[in-house]
């Protein structure tokens, strides 16, 4: 019976050590994955951010990591990743806003050009009508 208890105790100790290893390995692996994602530019990709509901991938990821593992989220390595991702998000939003302003300006200039063309076409049509009336009056006089 003593050997059975010793064996059970040894198994329990092995499980506890394995759990401790997993508890260390999972956050470390997650951190490494996030560092690779940050380095590869995934957090600053506008196409990816657009699929995340407008909040940006970095904000979404950071919120999840903070909820799961707050000490990991606050690590010096990831703080840099968060900053870089947030800066990339801010730049992407600024570029989107600038693109919208340029598109609006281009759209208004296109509308103005169409209005000028329509006015010119209207004048030409009116001029043609006046010329036709003049020819008809000239024929009447003959």
Image (cartoon, rainbow, N blue to C red):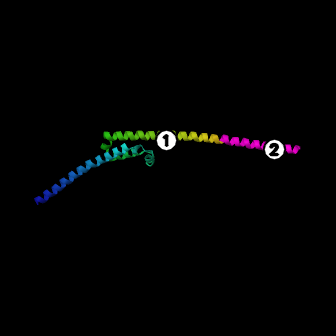
3D distance between C-alphas at marks 1 and 2: 54 Å
Q: Closer to the camera, 13 or 94? A: 94
Which structural element holds mark 1? helix
Splitting the image into 4 quarters, where does residue 87 fall?
top left
Q: Is residue 65 above or below residue 12?
A: above
Which quadrant would the N terminus be assigned to in this image?
Answer: bottom left
Q: Position of residue 117 (x, y in %)?
A: 67, 41
The part of the chain drawn in magenta is 115-142
Seen at 33% across and 41% down, the residue is 78
Q: Is residue 110 magenta?
A: no
At which x and y percent is residue 19?
A: 23, 52
**Residue found at the far right of this picture:** 142
Residue displayed at 26% across by 49% down: 23
Q: Which mark is residue 122?
A: none
Where does label 1 land, which residue? 96
Looking at the rendering, which quadrant does residue 136 occupy?
Answer: top right
Q: Is residue 99 left or right of residue 10?
A: right
Residue neighbourhood size for the residue with mark 2, other residues' Cα within 10 Å, grouped as few (<14), some (14–19), many (≥20): few
Q: Position of residue 47 (x, y in %)?
A: 45, 47
Please tell me the numbered disc located at residue 133.
2
Q: Which residue is nearer to you in this view: 27 or 116?
A: 116
Q: Closer to the N terminus: mark 1 or mark 2?
A: 1
Considering the image in quadrants, where does the C terminus appear? top right
Asked whether, in this view, residue 107 is left or right of residue 27, the answer is right
- Residue visible at 23% across and 49% down? 21
């Amino acid at each position: 019976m003593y050997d059975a208890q010793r064996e059970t105790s040894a198994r329990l100790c092995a499980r506890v050590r394995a759990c401790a290893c997993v508890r260390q390995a999972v956050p470390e692996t997650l951190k490494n994955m996030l560092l690779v994602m940050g380095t590869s530019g995934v957090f600053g990709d506008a196409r990816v951010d657009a699929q995340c509901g407008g909040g940006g991938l970095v904000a979404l990821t950071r919120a999840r990591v903070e909820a799961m593992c707050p000490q990991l989220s606050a690590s010096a390595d990831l703080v840099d990743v968060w900053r870089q991702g947030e800066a990339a998000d801010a730049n992407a939003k600024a570029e989107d806003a600038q693109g919208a302003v340029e598109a609006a300006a281009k759209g208004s200039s296109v509308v103005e050009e169409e209005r000028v063309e329509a006015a010119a076409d209207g004048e030409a049509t009116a001029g043609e009508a006046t010329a036709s009336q003049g020819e008809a009056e000239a024929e009447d006089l003959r």
